[in-house]
Amino acid sequence: MSSKLIQPPPMAASREAISRRRGNAKMLLSFSDFNSKTLSFSDNPFRLRPMCIGKVTEQSSASSPTDQQEVDEEEDITVSQIKEELYEALKGINRGVFGVKSDKKAEIEGLVKLLECRNPTPEPTGELDKIGGCWKLIYSTITVLGSKRTKLGLRDFVSLGDLLQQIDIAQGKTVHVLKFDVRGLNLHDGEFRIVANFKIISKSSVEITYESSTIMPDQLMNIFKKNMNLLLGIFNPEGLFEISYLDEDLQVGRDGKGNLFVLEKSEEP
């Protein structure tokens, strides 16, 4: 028995997405769970890829030239390329709030996992300066569908604007801001604010505790007051939040229910 690097199964959705930019080259894209401790890091954070160590027989130790070419091509995929494909995949889906097709969702998930495997900040809670500030949601698997969307008036009467996350490291607080545009009342700057506290519980996780919520102005409160519990139930950030990717302008995380969030750094509102 000898040790050999074993590549996990390829990600079909993400491979197809990136191959659109790289011609018809065949690539094997591998990753491991973002909680895995088997990630191997080199001096260049944009050429990282996870490796799984296992035991194989001598007969399987040889790799073909084609296999080696696939691995080499995989290593050439940069974070910039993955981000470019991710932003392209997110076009026209309104952050996923009102649902996306299963193939599109799989494509996005595959690209996100490729980013998570190349995370330049494996211990984000130890680099709080990168986390602080304002972030804008660009994708989430949390959805507002069917009767929920109707009850909240998010079909015709009310439009959902930016969803922002303002993180105050010094105070240990986060403010989640949902912007609304209510055409019938000529309101273009209504908002729902959720204030919460957070505490670090691991090298990559925080625990978020709900503190309060408000809707402004009063006209908007009159619209939502019957469904405040519904609105809060959808967007309340309380619970575990694990940061699986973090750099200067992009953050990826998952909550305790497994929902995925992709946010980009934004200017303070």
Image (cartoon, rainbow, N blue to C red):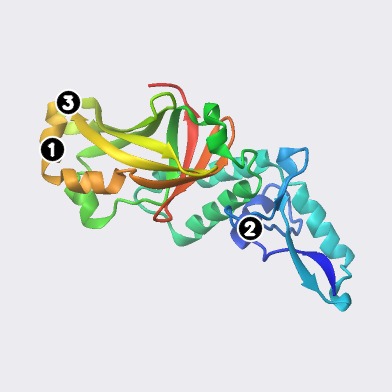
- In the picture, the disc for residue 32 is 2
Query: x, y percentage for residue 21?
Result: 68, 47
Q: Residues within 10 Å of mark 2 (few under 14, many from 20)?
A: many
Dividing the image into 4 quarters, which one contains the N terminus? Answer: bottom right
Identity of the residue drawn at 82% across and 53% down: 72
The answer to whether residue 155 of the structure is visible from this angle is no
Q: Is residue 46 above or below residue 214?
A: below
Drawn side of residue 111 relative to residue 189, left or right: right
Quadrant that contains the C terminus: top left
**Pointer 1 or 2: first along the chain:** 2
Amino acid type, mark 2: Ser
Give the residue at x 39% y 55%.
Answer: 257
> In this rendering, would 268 be left or right of 178?
right
Q: Which residue is mark 1?
A: 223
- Residue 217, given in percent of the width and then of the height, sits at 17, 26
Q: Position of residue 5 (x, y in %)?
A: 79, 63
Crowd class of label 3 (few under 14; some 14 to 19; many from 20; radius 10 Å): few
Count how many numbered circles sit on residues in the image: 3
- The vertical placement of 55 against 126, above or below, is below
Q: Please, what is the three-letter code of the amino acid marked with disc 3?
A: Pro
Please state which of residues 195 and 225 is positioned toward the viewer in this rendering. 195
Q: Give left or right: position of 109 versus 235.
A: right
Q: Amino acid at mark 1?
A: Ile
Q: Which of the 4 quarters of the picture holds residue 30?
A: bottom right
Camera-nearest label, 3 or 2:
2
Labels 1 & 2 near each other (Cβ < 8 A): no
x and y percent of residue 35 in the render? 57, 54
Mark 3 — residue? 217
Residue 232, by quadrant, is top left
Q: CA distance from mark 1 to mark 3?
A: 11 Å
